[in-house]
Amino acid sequence: MQLSKERIGALFFLALAILYGYYGSEIQLFPGDELEPMNARTLPYAITILTAGLAIFLLATANPDSEDDAHQVFEWKLVVLLIGLTVLYGLALDWLGFLLATILFLICGFRILGVTRWRVLLQVSVPFVVIFWGGLTQGLDIYLAPGRLFTILFSG
Amino acid sequence: MLEGILTGLETAIMPTNLLMVVVGCFVGTFIGMLPGLGPISAIALMIPITYGLEPSTGIILMAGVYYGAIFGGSTSSILINAPGCSGTVVTSFDGYPLAAKGQAGKALAIAAYASFTGGTISAIFLLVAAPMLAEVSLSFQSADYFALMILGLSAVAAFSGKGQVIKAVLMTLFGLMLSTVGTDRATGVERFTFGSIDLLDGISFLLLAMATFALAEALMSVLWGEHREDATGGQDMSKLGSMKLTKEEVKEIAPPIARSSVLGFFVGVLPGAGATIAAFLAYGVDRNLASEKDRQKFGKGSLRGLAAPEAANNAASSGSFVPLLTLGIPGSGTTAIMLGALISYGIQPGPRLFVDHPEVFWSVIISMYIGNVVLLILNLPLIPYISKLLIIPRPILVPMILLFSITGVYLVSFNSVDIVIMAAVCSLAIVLRLLTFPMAPLLLGFILGGMMEDNLRRALLINDDSLSFLWERPITLSIVIITVLVLAAPVFQKTIQRIFKVDDHADLSID
């Protein structure tokens, strides 16, 4: 069986339905709830059956010809790097604080997308983040924690 | 009704709300201009800002962004042949050839006048239809709401374009799956939380919307290599030519605009149809009605071919507010986001909105007029300047969009784990987008899932656990029949396409 986009999608949804159905059966009910016509498991079961049925239908009727994007060059590396950067930003935010973490996020983001001149990197990211941070903290009165690292370093 | 209009007018012309319409239109125009970023992303990016505002002010801002994004999408369709959203794809058919002939100013003016007329006619219809429908829907019961939600979800799938119906239904089911994560509201039972406290309240709507639209669309543009392209398409944005129209030209475009405005409104009212289908239909209808000589001009810079879809897509945008405001059922991905925002304000759209929060109901409708005026009077003359924002290089712009998306979620929850979850959801969304699964049904399923389950539970309780409620009441039965017809619609799609000569390869994905 040739794996076209549709078939890959169908297999994904079939696997999702199986997993969802399995965890749906694990939902703890209160005593007597299983006798009710509708309990916490009813909708998950209905969704599981419909999803599995449609996924099998799509699998069976999918066009076997792969509508490939052979002519299209995907920039996977850049996207993976940007997603990785997003994860790192999430992890660094609590430690470095909003200001520093965001400046680093923008500098790295610009660099990943091909901006190499340090002057541009700093001239765009630093003022932008400082104005953004000022707007949030002073304008909208939002408290942004300074970051655990600074608290540890400067609180003695 | 007059009292309501005055209430709406009073709220809409408050300085803050007027400012929000203007800001919304400008921001929407700019975001809508960026190829790849549509109205859904534009509105999603606004949600965190609106949390600090009054509900009516917030929804007015989002409505302004919506029109602005559609207008901005038309602008990029005309100037650089790169539609900002699917609703303005048809605009590029005749708008870009006009711009290529050195008549970009004229094309933009026609688009603005057509949008203004479409939006205004549609807003008048909305003014009349919405209160009437709201009063009728006051008699709706849980059974009717359950049937309506099924209709809304089915319609979204049915109108999702060639070969996409099953995929759209699967995405709707995926949205329903995600809506079941958290504590079951009726029984208090935990579902799919895997012991995590973070999941007890369910998945955040904002996180899902941002990750699947704003973040994913920005990263998709990187994936396609669009960040390397010049966003201006090499066009000199300061030289757009005259924006004046001759009397003959006005006479030529007036009838298609009027026709398409009415058509657009009614298509917009249908759940799941929206601006894209309205624009394609209006284009097809006008091409069919044109004389043989005029028909030859379509696709080569026809003024009618530009005016018709522009009037229709704007009219449909206003029309899509009818089911949202009166029934609480979003008819499109964009209105689904607005529904999510309204719910987060503690406001439940639907027939009670008209009674409980008349200032929100009426001010949104009145702000539509104001939004149209702002687009015509302020945005049109400023297009040469607004479009200069496109000069900002993409490698600078993309990380900023990512930052706004991420901080939008973080500044609401202040939980950095949300950013990591966002990255994971976004990665999945990118894969599903590449497998050509539409994203809007996911949001609709997610938004309607909880409400659908509540209404089904209530209907079963009232009807002694019997499903007979689906055919016992005439209203419910009518909705069920319409749902069946809507689901059968794709079967007749080819016939419809033949009648209206809609482009077979047209992507009618919902917006």
Image (cartoon, rainbow, N blue to C red):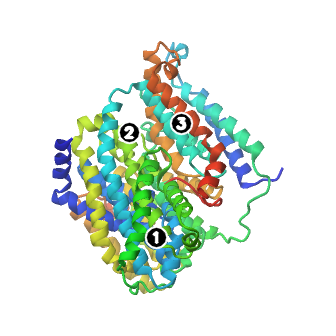
Q: Quadrant of residue B447?
A: top left
Q: Secondary structure at mark 2?
A: loop
Instruction: Let me know if residue B489 appears in the view.
Output: yes
Residue B500's place in the image compared with B460, above or below, is below
Occupied quadrant, residue A151: bottom left
Q: Please tell me which residue lies in front, B471 or A50.
A: B471
Please name the residue that numbered disc 1 is placed on.
B34
Q: Residues within 10 Å of mark 3 (few under 14, many from 20)?
A: few
> Vertically, is B431 above or below B492?
below
Q: What amino acid is at disc 1?
A: Leu
Query: What SS does tag 1 mark?
Result: loop
Rendered location of residue A37, percent (x, y): 53, 17
To which residue does mark 3 refer?
Answer: B194
Disc 3/disc 1 C-alpha distance (Å) = 40 Å
Chain letter for mark 1: B
Q: Chain of mark 2?
A: B
Residue B21, image x, y percentages? 27, 61
* Residue under pointer 2: B328
Q: Chain of mark 3?
A: B
Left or right of B355, for residue B171: right
> Mark 3 or 1 closer to N-term?
1
